[in-house]
Structures are given as C-alpha cells and as structure tokens.
Image (cartoon, rainbow, N blue to C red):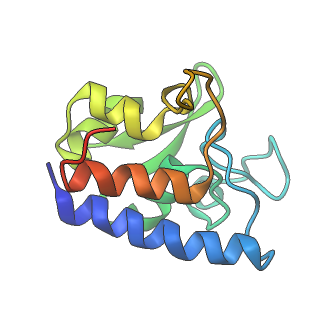
Amino acid sequence: MKKARLQKVVDYLRKVRIEIAKGLRPEFDMDEWLQLKDPGVFKNKKTLECATAACAIGHVAHLFNKQGFKLELDKIDNRVTPVYKGFIDFDALQEFFDIDRATAMALFHPDYYADEDGYEYSPTVSQVADKIENVIHGIEE
C-alpha cells in the first residue's frame, strides 16, 4: 500500500471540504468522477485535467496527473474513466495505490458507503477522507 499517496489524498480532500463550504468548488458527489462547467462537453484533453472534479477519483486524477493518473474519455462508450499505466477504472486505482480490489472499491465506490443499519448513502468529502485515513492506519470499520 502506498500510504504516502493515500495520505496526500486525505490532506487534499480536507482542503476541498473547506473550498466546498466557501462555495469555491462544486459539491462532492461520489457518483460522478468529475463535473464540468458545461456538462457533457469534452472540448479537449485539458478539459479532463481541470480542478472541477466531483468525487474522490476525480480529485485523485487532478492531484496525481503528473504521476500519470488521469481521467480520459473512453470513446467506445463515451464515458470518462480513470487510467494509469494502461490500467482502467478501479484497476487503475489498485495499481496506483498498490491496494487490492476490495480496498479500492471500499474507498472509492459510492455503493460501499453505508450507515450502521446497512443503508447506502452518498458520503461527504470528510467521510471519504476519514475512511481513507482509517485504511492507512489499519483501523477496521
């Protein structure tokens, strides 16, 4: 596990929370990998590297773009997907953070956030940061 990279995500998400509260960023939404000012319009590759990411994966792509983790438009099904060294989607997260599939899903997939009664919910940016930090420190949820 590349704990330093995960901690960098935690620190970044904590800053994002403040920017969201100040109205400087769009709301955090785990169901969207990024938000564009003009939804559905992908003008060029630079559009996918902007700071308007919506969920944790979008923020990871913005934060680690120079290290090769990116969001790219999949021309086959016209959706944006994370990419790293030829790996796509959650495989890219696994490879980039050196984590297993279960951990990648638990941290970055919206369906893996549920309350104590088992009801799924859309997590806040703080809840995602806390969950990542717990994984870093080996705290079971």
Residue 11 position by quadrant: bottom left
User: Percent from the top left, x then y, of residue 135?
Assistant: 26, 48
User: In the shown orientation, is residue 14 left or right of residue 77?
Assistant: left
Quarter of the image that includes the C terminus = top left
Q: Is residue 67 visible?
A: no
Left or right of 78 in this view: 15:
left
- What residue appears at the point 49 percent right and 32 percent down from the top-left corner? 109
Tell me the residue at 63%/30% (across/down): 79
Q: Residue at x 80, y 46 (%)?
A: 41
Q: Position of residue 58 (x, y in %)?
A: 54, 52
Nearer to me, 20 or 57: 20
Residue 117, by quadrant, is top right
Q: 127 above or below 101?
A: below
The answer to whether residue 19 of the structure is visible from this angle is yes
**Residue at 29% from the left image edge and 58% from the top image edge:** 6
Q: Establish if 8 lies above or below 114.
A: below
Which residue is at the far front? 117
Q: Residue 35's spot in the image, x, y percent?
A: 72, 51
Q: What is the total number of numbered labels drawn onto the structure image?
A: 0
In x, y percent, where is residue 136? 22, 54
